[in-house]
Amino acid sequence: FWWIVAGIAGRLMFHGREAQSGRRPFWGRELPFELLLAVGMGMIGNALCAYFKIDGAASAGVVSAVAYLGPRAIDTLFE
């Protein structure tokens, strides 16, 4: 379950950037939803790594990047 940690790290980077720019408070009501989203995006990133046979530190980077981008970027990618 290492991908949960990588997913949370990626989502917290996104959430921190949003808080720094003033679009949301860091300790706001969005934070629990971001953590749930991080787990889901971690699953998606882990599945992508398994499909493309990416392992090791590269897979942690892929999972973090997928979690950082979030579902909106994935929706845009497939449109």
Image (tube, rainbow, N blue to C red):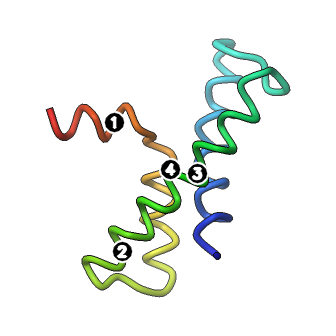
Residue 48 % position (x, y): 33, 68
Q: Residues within 10 Å of mark 2 (few under 14, many from 20)?
A: some
Q: Which mark is residue 73?
A: 1
Residue on which disc 2 sits: 49
Q: Residues within 10 Å of mark 3 (few under 14, many from 20)?
A: many
Kindly report which numbered mark, 2 or 3, lies closer to the viewer in this rendering.
2
Relative image position of residue 75 (x, y in whole percent): 28, 34
Q: CA distance from mark 4 to mark 1?
A: 10 Å
Binning the other alpha carbons within 10 Å of mark 1 as few (below 14), some (14 to 19) or many (20 upward) gives: few
**In terms of sequence position, does the residue under pointer 3 or pointer 1 come before the other?**
3
* Closest to the observer, 64 or 29: 29
**Residue placed farthest to the right in the image?**
27
Residue at mark 1 to residue at mark 2: CA–CA distance = 18 Å
Left or right: residue 50 compared with residue 70: left
* Badge 2 amino acid: Cys
- Type of residue at label 4? Ala
The residue carrying mark 3 is 10
Q: Earlier in the sequence, mark 3 or mark 4?
A: 3
Whether label 3 touches label 4, CB < 8 Å: yes
Quick one: label 1 or label 2, which is nearer the N terminus? 2
Residues at marks 2 and 3, CA–CA distance in whole angstroms: 16 Å
User: In the figure, 34 relative to 66: above or below?
Assistant: above
Q: Earlier in the sequence, mark 2 or mark 4?
A: 2
